[in-house]
Image (cartoon, helix red, strand yellow):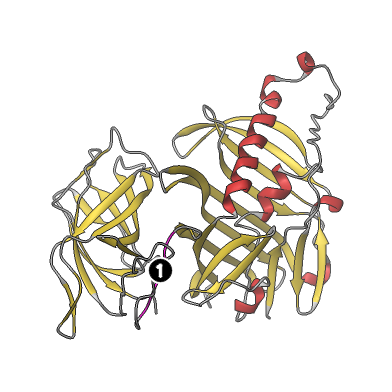
Amino acid sequence: MIWNVAGLLVSRKIGRWLLAFGAATACAAQSEVPSELRQLPRIKSQMADYFSRISNLTCIETIERFRPDQEGQLRKYDTIRLEVTLVNNRELFSKLGAAKIEVSDVSEFNGGGAIESGLFAAYAHGVFQENWATYHYAGEEMLRNRRAARYNYELPLPGSGYRISIGGRQAVLPYSGSFWVDGKTLEVMRLTVHPNGLPRWSGIWNVQQTIDYARVRLSGADYRLPHRAEMTVLGMSWGQTQNVTEFTHWLRYAVESALVIEGEPPATSKGEQALDLPLGLELATRFDTEISLEEAVEGDPIAAVLERDAVLKGRRIVPAGAKLTGRIRAIEHLPSGDYRLSLEFAQLESGARKVRFLARLTGVNSPSGVVRSKTDSSLLSVVDLRTRGSRLHLGRDLILVWRTGWI
């Protein structure tokens, strides 16, 4: 069966905030409102800043899709890579490498199975920026080794815009869920979305979506952006399917140069030239950042330096000394006491020239006590490492070898 699940933004003029506090209404005296609910305007204000800036950004969504095999075990059956951005409150998509980002219907990239939109901005806009949602404080929890406050919300049908479409039939549904904010900064860490009242003709028992957010530094400014999302669908006849979406290679497209594959490098808006990275180019890089567990946090900038000239068919493409820049994508303390570290490299720079870095990791020469965590990741320009023991320190003895391309 070919079907898609999509959460779409419904454009409307954003009115004043309306906070429903259960027994305490928006018109209740401030002293009668619990302190946790008095934090909501600050949370919503931070999300308003998020929406004011995300329309200048673009990223790559890598979607891995899983469905049951003959034994009923979930197995990955395909990977979809899309460019996504927000224009006039609409999410637009393209295949990775396309000249323009201009498709508004994500189902054009479906190819059978489940696919979703709304992760970039639409779900969060409905929860935090529209005036329909009601909120209830649900207590404190630990999330990613940090103390977090959890809030439950409900979004009724008039303010939802959540659309499910299957085989030419569609329905708009109300949805509900929870969000978690950092106990100190009140930044949103996670948002869950659950459609209510799924029609029987859909053949779906349940849909659950989770969006995790993380810090990303771009052009010297910090952003709180989608990091990873999961969608689990339980069907009445086909069992459970799952999509895992990873967000990488964030760019401020108004000021940063675009990727060039083959051909002549075009001039940028500043008269500079972009690097030309042909497919299949091998680059050996040495880590150029010191990372210690005591100081490192998600989102911190990292760098690596090209050890030798990158040559293809006897022609030097990138000189030795060119710099790869990126960020710490994730740090996870495992139950075993070890740590998992994910590093993302997004841009290659040589002098005044630069290009978005899209490559597959082909080799790791790591120091004692650090091993490659996995080798089958679909993420481009990302390396996952795992420590042996509780001490995490990385430096110039980490060698990473890459091959450009994404096919």
How would you classify the magenta stretch by its main secondary structure? loop
The magenta segment? 256-261
Please name the residue shown 79% across and 16% down the image: 32
**Quadrant that contains the N terminus:** bottom right
Q: Amino acid at mark 1?
A: Ser
Query: Which residue is at the front of the view, 232 or 309?
Result: 309
Tell me residue 59's x, y (percent): 50, 61
Farthest residue to the front: give it: 271
Decide if residue 346 is on the left or right side of residue 160. Answer: left
Please name the residue shown 35% across and 83% down the image: 263
Query: Which residue is at the front of the view, 395 or 308?
Result: 308
Please name the residue shown 77% across and 43% down the image: 154
Tell me residue 170's x, y (percent): 81, 71
Please name the residue shown 60% across and 81% down the image: 111
Residue 73: tell me if it is visible.
Answer: no
Disc 1 target residue? 378
